[in-house]
Image: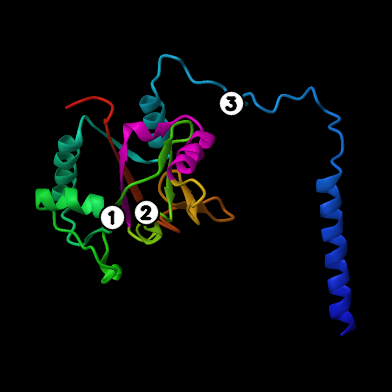
Amino acid sequence: MRLVEQLITAKEKILKKVRQALTFKSKNQFTNIDLDSNIYVQPSSDLSLIEIFAEQFTNVNGEFIYCSNQFDFLDKLITLLEQRKWKHFFCWEHHLQDMLKDTGIIFNHKNEQLEKIQAAITSCEALIARTGTVLVSSSANSRTLTIWPPVHIVYAKKSQLVMETKDGMLLVKNRYGKNGPSLLSFITGPSRTADIEGTLVIGAHGPTEIFVFIVDDTTKD
């Protein structure tokens, strides 16, 4: 009983200090520090966002495919599926399913036979050019299909390209408002890890390959 009382007392003391800190804010002693300017070296002005992303994404062993429009995307996706001869291709997002159905692409839309999965396709929330990162969320993209399959295919639009992580977060905020996703994941290349000896292992905690098909939605077909 005394232990419980001590814990409660300690908790109350901490909360009291927090309330006091919120009520009586200390004066900032370092007013001359610039907290707003970008700390990163700016890329060459000759490069577009899509070129920056493609360079950074391929540097981390990602596969980047540019598509001039949606028809070009479907054509290139079909080519990839035929080359790899995948029999267990998964897609759980309805808007992607509608596109695939029109082309006759066979896919699994249920959460059955996951042990047989060879590849899966999802959309994304944003593409971060500076780091070559794909931003996905629990609201729009299946957590399972972004980490479970050996190959993860991402369908993205050029309008989802941003330079910085904060810009990607702003896209998410503008899309969902106060009802934001419970989980955001940043994917930079295939899953990889290294043990104590420094041996690099690809696919240790997720896909061994990741493809990004980016569709140019900024121009009319």
Amino acid on which disc 2 is placed = Asn
| Residue found 27% across the figure and 71% down from its top | 112
What is the CA distance from the residue labelled 3 to the residue labelled 2? 30 Å
Mark 1, other Cα within 10 Å: few <14 / some 14–19 / many ≥20 = some
Could you tell me if the residues under marks 3 and 2 are in contact, i.e. CB atoms within 8 Å?
Answer: no
Give the structural element (helix, strand or loop) at label 1. Answer: loop
| Residue found 40% across the figure and 44% down from its top | 125
Which residue lies under the disc numbered 1?
93
Quarter residue 31 falls in: top right
Which residue lies under the disc numbered 2?
141
The quadrant the C terminus occupies is top left
Q: Who is closer to the viewer here, 124 or 149? A: 124
The quadrant the N terminus occupies is bottom right
Could you tell me if the residues under marks 1 and 3 are in contact, i.e. CB atoms within 8 Å?
Answer: no
Q: Which mark is residue 164?
A: none
Residue 201, image x, y percentages: 45, 53
What is the CA distance from the residue labelled 1 to the residue labelled 3? 35 Å
Upstream in sequence: badge 1 or badge 3: 3
Upstream in sequence: badge 3 or badge 2: 3
Upstream in sequence: badge 1 or badge 2: 1
13 sits to left or right of 192: right
Q: Does 5 lie within the magenta span?
A: no
Q: Who is closer to the viewer here, 92 or 210? A: 92
What is the CA distance from the residue labelled 1 to the residue labelled 2? 7 Å
Q: Does 153 lie within the magenta span?
A: yes
Which residue lies under the disc numbered 3?
40
Against 190, is 166 above or below?
above
Magenta stretch: give its range. 150-175
90 sits to left or right of 125: left
Could you tell me if the residues under marks 1 and 2 are in contact, i.e. CB atoms within 8 Å?
Answer: yes
| Residue found 40% across the figure and 19% down from its top | 47
Q: Who is closer to the viewer here, 149 or 23? A: 23
